[in-house]
Image (cartoon, rainbow, N blue to C red):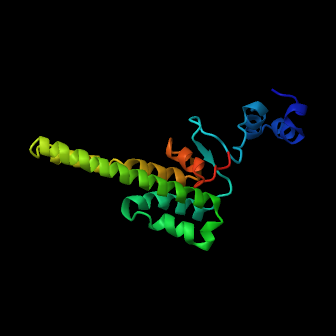
Amino acid sequence: MKTSEEIGPEMAEAAAKGDETAEEIASAAPEDVAEPPTAVEESSEGRAWASEDTTDNDRLMAGLAYLSQVVIPVLVPAIMLLAEDSKGRPYQKYHAVQSLGFLVVAVIYEVLAAIVYCGLTSLTSNCLACVLWLIFLLPVVPALYFAYQAYQGLYFKIPILTDFLVQSNWLETPPA
């Protein structure tokens, strides 16, 4: 058992009285206690950062920016970039611009998917048409994932897109 200097006078009194909770607390070494997360914490992959200054509204709007790209493209990010309340919120602005960039990439993908779809269905006499339509749904998966990450309050990088947006000065680098 630790000495009273190591665990503090209050814990030493509680331990002397036989309080089990105090013993458990006192037995934990200071180095065993996890430090609280910092304001900005990098994930193990190095692509996501937590933000401390986001509100629930910021997180909701950022998540909707990506989620709306599946249902009603452009609408929510455009509102976020034009509304007076959202203009000054860096978290909302970051995700609005990044979701619009993601939309552009998704549209380019859809055009290429349509070309592949038409070519392969005509080559196979429409035999693959019932299976190939699934290629049009592929951008939905990352959009849902990005919406989830944004709703969790994270700044994250979409591998090539975010670097391009930062270099083009369309997107400011998030606090890291």
Residue pushed farthest left?
Answer: 125
* Residue 54 visible in the shown view: yes
The residue closer to the viewer here, 35 or 65, is 65
Image quarter hosting the C terminus: top right
Counting from the top left corner in percent of width and height, residue 99 is at: 49, 56
Quarter-of-image position of residue 73: bottom left
Residue in the picture at 38% in, 58% down? 70
Quarter-of-image position of residue 80: bottom right
Counting from the top left corner in percent of width and height, residue 165 is at: 55, 50
Image quarter hosting the N terminus: top right
Q: Is residue 173 left or right of residue 107?
A: right
The residue closer to the viewer here, 70 or 37, is 70
Residue in the picture at 63% in, 48% down? 50
The residue closer to the viewer here, 164 or 145, is 164
* Residue 29 visible in the shown view: no
Residue pushed farthest front?
Answer: 168
Counting from the top left corner in percent of width and height, residue 95 is at: 55, 56
Residue in the picture at 62% in, 67% down? 87
Counting from the top left corner in percent of width and height, residue 24 is at: 73, 35
Residue pushed farthest top?
Answer: 1
Residue 167 to residue 96: above or below: above
Residue in the picture at 48% in, 66% down? 76
Residue 166 to residue 26: above or below: below
Residue 7 to residue 55: above or below: above
